[in-house]
Image (spheres, rainbow, N blue to C red):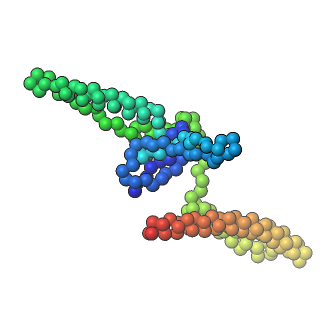
Amino acid sequence: MKEAILTDLNGYYVEPELVPLETEGVTEIYSTPAPTEEAPHPEAALIGYRVAVPVPPGLYRPRFDVTAWRAALNDYAAAMDAYHVAIAAYDPESGGPQPQPPKPIDARAFWVEGLSQAEIDALRTAPQPETLEQKLARLESTTQQLDSRTACLPAVSQTAATSDERSQAMQAVDDYILGLVFAQQATIDAQAQQIANLLQRVEQLEGGAGS
């Protein structure tokens, strides 16, 4: 088995698909709508293509130029016909150069960039999402800051001159710390869930690779 690419009608990459090793080139994909009272025998409609050609690296939104590929196939077939005629008429004793067959088509050349330069520039300058390592480092840093603020509670309470002032100071600090704790806990819970989802996905991928 090998990987082929399913595209839409315009040749844009949709998703990969496993196909037999002997699958080559581009094949059309049709789908037949469900029968209705108005159309009891609907005709199959073209919905995309199966491209058994590797996608070259470096493309942001790969698109296979089906029109250019078909034109290249026609040109190649015409060139091959001309070569057969020329080689049949060739006389080695004439001293002239022997006709050469046309060069094979490199189908990879028909994978092109589907985004405009402006769209590519926008992607390059867009903020990148945090990696798992960056999220863990940020959570650790925030937790250390929270621990540091909590450690200052005795010093804050001792600066109050009276018991009422100490009580008010402690209450204000407690309220502040509780607010931080609740906010931080919500963040930690969300990040922990994301990490759990990632770990579960890794286990699924490793299980599929080992099967």
Q: Is residue 203 above or below residue 34?
A: below
Q: Residue at horizontal 52%, vertical 50%?
A: 15
197 or 94: nearer the viewer: 94
Report the front residue among 165 and 18: 18
User: At 85% across and 72% down in the image, what residue appears?
Assistant: 171
Percent x, y of residue 27: 45, 43
Outermost residue, right side: 164
Horizontally, residue 2 falls left or right of residue 94, namely right
Query: Residue 203 placed where, x, y %?
Result: 52, 69
- The answer to which of 55 and 180 lies nearer the viewer is 55
Q: Residue at x 40, y 43 (%)?
A: 25
Whether residue 8 appears in this view of the structure is: no
62 or 64: which is nearer to us? 64
The quadrant the C terminus occupies is bottom left
As drawn, 73 above or below 32: above
Q: Position of residue 173 (x, y in %)?
A: 80, 70
Quadrant in the picture for residue 197? bottom right
Residue 45 seen in the current view: yes
Looking at the figure, which quarter contains the N terminus? bottom left
Q: Is residue 17 left or right of residue 100?
A: right
Q: Residue drawn at (54%, 35%), measured in percent from left and top?
A: 117
Position of residue 30 relative to residue 210, above or below, is above
**Percent position (x, y) of residue 86?**
22, 25
Residue 8 in which image quadrant: top right
Please tell me in which quadrant of the rendered image residue 96 appears: top left
